[in-house]
Image: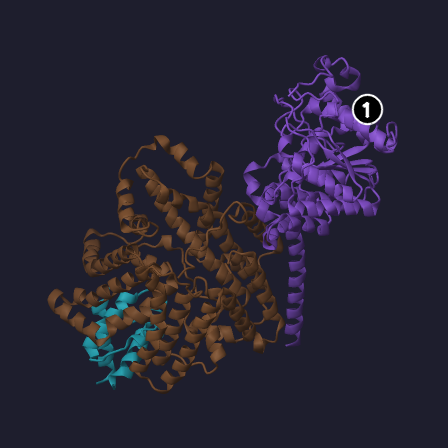
Chain colours: A brown, B cyan, C purple
Amino acid sequence: MSILSLEFLAFAVGAVLLYYCLPLKIRWVVLLAGSAAYMALAGWQSIAHISAVALVMWGGGLALQRKKSRLLLALLLIPDLGAMIFLKYWPALSGAAMILPLGLSYFTFQSAGYLIDVYRGKMQAQKNPLKAWLFIGYFPQLAQGPISTWKELGSQLLTGHRFEPENTVSGFTLLLWGYFKKLVIADRLAKTTDALINGSGLPGWFVLGGVILYTIRLYLDFSGGMDVVRGLSRMLGIELPENFRRPFFARSVSEYWRRWHITLGAWFRSYLLYPLTTCRAGIGLGKFASGAFGKKTGRTFPSALATLVVFLLIGVWHTANWNAVVYGAYFGLVMGVSMLLEPLWKTMRTTLNLPREGWMAPLRLIRTWGLILLAQYFAFTLNPEMGFSLLRSTFQAWDFSGFAVRTAAVMEPLEWIIAGIGCLFVLIVDILCEKKTDVCGRLAKAHFYIRWPALLFLILAIVSFGIYGSGYDGAAFLYTQF
Amino acid sequence: MCKMDDMQRLLAALEEVRDDVDFAGQYGLVDEGVIDSLDLTQIIAALDDAFDIHIPAGEIEPENFNSVQDMLALVRRYQGK
Amino acid sequence: MAEQTVSRRKKIAFFWLRLVCFALLTALLLSYAVYVFTPKSDYGICSMMNLYRQPDDSIDVLAVGTSLAYAGINTNVLWEEYGIAAYDLCSAEQPFWVSYYTLREVLKTQRPKVILLDAKPAIYTRDYSKRGRTILSTFGIRGIENRIGAILACVEKSRDALGYILGLPEVHSNYSKLTANDFVFPPDNGSRGASWKGYIESDQVEHHQKPSLVFNTVRRNMNDREEEYARKIFELAQAEGIPVLLLGLPNPDYANDHMYYNALWAVAEEYGVHGINYNDPGIRFGLRYSSDFADWQHLNVKGSVTFSRKLGEDLKMLFDLPDRRGDAKYISYDECARQWFDQYPLFESSAWEEHPLNWFAGEEEMP
């Protein structure tokens, strides 16, 4: 069931109530039952696949603990990751339609991480297969992640949590905030993306504006979904890791990728990037490159190469089309090259006496935005041709004469105003969060006459201006079909 | 090999990676974001050069790199292998 | 440790208290939001909500049906000429099932002497009746069982009903059309005031011709759900002992309706219910198709006056309807009529005979 549906809300409320009604020791069973029901409702393919993966993970984990064998690890990871790869990419290659199990990528990555962590001796394998199932099947994280490690999530799931009113209220606030971002703003902006895809002969400013709005929309859609999921989880006393940390405050593309889809980046870093760069071959490559280019650059070379590979994979993970390859390769190259050239920039900075903060900060922000924006041309378009064509048209026909007509054709002025005010709110809250204010927590601790108006405002805004109900086809969360 | 030598070698290796960071006095190097993932991979390479040890990817955790003491402990663990 | 438990219990108790208060407040605000967003133009919400303001047992003639009925049955003429206390409880395209549930609701507080049932829904197909605004007309019903019953009868799949039962999913998109009036509770009935009796006039004048068709007795089956609920209405009225009069309101589009009306009349016969089809050319009452209609379906102001005079005459003849003029309980009818005739002075009965448009009364266009 979609996170946006009334059924999900009813399910969530029921789960929370049931959780706190039962004794502490068996609260994890409520989570298990709820998650199993949730998966079962998604279809037999979903529950069958995840149960198979859970079984392999549980059994494999115990086996790996007894015998740390690289071969065994490979034998376990291949079917796990292989099944995901097959289900995701076979339809694109063969044209056959396939039903993807709910949360396929997320539980696959999480189970792979579990196995690798056991192999690395970082954790004890779980003896109870049901508890192992719960780790990858925990229902809030199925639709869009985040991808958690056992260290982050495991014990939280299994220890029964006492009811903490403040936590519940804070979680509820976060949940509402997520719905606000998604339903009121992100879905409202969906029309601007459609206008770009379906339009032709669009003036440059229209294209640029549309791509910028797409980027904002994607952020609000994805981070809104994350907030709903994290808020719900917090109401159960379980803190899921953050997946977004105000990515548009990043001063560099690398920092952006540490703030955007954080857990995906962390997974690839822990389980792919580091092994690639620190394995014997990687170190050897580094030594070879040091000989050729000097120690500084040489040591960066394996990382740069591995970054390119990782981002190609991250790109393709999103969709099985050429756009994804362009997207991934672009970021991989940008970051790889910037890694290799870092010593050069450093020397330039010291000779020209340029600070990193202060007046340089806005410049770095804008430069980062520009680089991110360029990639977005290949994020929502259907193929690279379309992406390049839109990119070309951004620099042509900067004719503002049709401004009023064109913008009104996309959305009525009132809609623009609502979206604009919504974005302003998000900006203010994000700035507060960037300055380390825990907005949800503070609100939960505040007096009810401060908190209630805020919550009621959110609720009324969502039910009044949210894109839901008849007259709209609610845009599903963009990151669910993975 | 005596302790001081190891520490000095460690600091020298770290200096190669980031000459702008005062490793000796700091804690929370990873947690506070003083060094990033690129630095970590380079430190691994540098440690490989300096101590002739191979540290696997699984050891790249904040606990092992938050301070020079943590790093030294890590090096010690792998020196025997 | 004991203190901790006590203070924790207090904390949780306070939390529940606050939660309940917050939930109640939210429910209240959301109900008000549904009210604000619900369009209060002629969709039947206002006439339903206004009905609750009528004193118990004060309506003698209850007209139930579609926009043809609320445009054609001029309650002010019925009052002014005959002292008949009539109320139009109608909405656009109101199918028989909505009429059925509104009747059940009304009969809780009213005991009309006759129910006028608009025959027009006989022609509706199910798709025609499914449109959202039909369902919105149920939003004025207070009784939950009747409101939910009406909504469930309106939708094809029960799942679709949820959005309507909750209200907001269906109406919240009207935020761009809100006016200050939408926030006023109770509604001011499109500035018609509290004494309004459900009649909504149409000022346009469209030139039409009398429909030409062969008046046979061939029947065309009604949509099964319409028939089901027409029967339910007849049964309900029978059980309550209230006579029903089927009304075929005149409309230029009648040629398409004829055979469905025949079917409805046949069904009504089974319950001993009769009707008057004013489209029948045998019934002459000075109606002029060239000037009395606002469009293909609805009588305009002049048409409604002409028609209602005839209707009142027929009602007086068929049923024992007391003349309520002068009765203090019915003062709102006086007010309503007064207000209306002030707006349309030409249609006052004393002026009617002198009305320029009636100089040629009695002559109707030949097909």
Residue C230 as seen in the image, left or right of residue A460: right
Residue A259 vertical placement versus A151 (above, below): above
Q: Is residue B36 above or below residue C167?
A: below
Q: Which residue is mark 1?
A: C81
Residue A394 appearing in the image? yes
State the image coordinates of residue C126 (x, y, percent, origin top left).
61, 45
- Residue C129 picture quarter: top right
On the rendered image, what quadrant is the C terminus of chain A found in? bottom left
On the image, the x and y values in percent for residue C261 come to 69, 37
Instruction: Determine the chain carrying the residue at label 1.
Output: C
Q: Residue at x 20, y 74 (%)?
A: A281
Q: How many marks on residues?
A: 1
Q: Residues within 10 Å of mark 1 (few under 14, many from 20)?
A: some
User: Which residue occupies the extreme left position in the image?
Assistant: A292
The front one of C74 and A200 is C74
Establish if A367 lies above or below C215: below
* As drawn, C133 above or below A18: above
Q: Amino acid at mark 1?
A: Glu
Q: Which of these two is toward me, C195 or C321?
A: C321
* Badge 1 element: helix
Q: Position of residue A314 (x, y in %)?
A: 32, 62
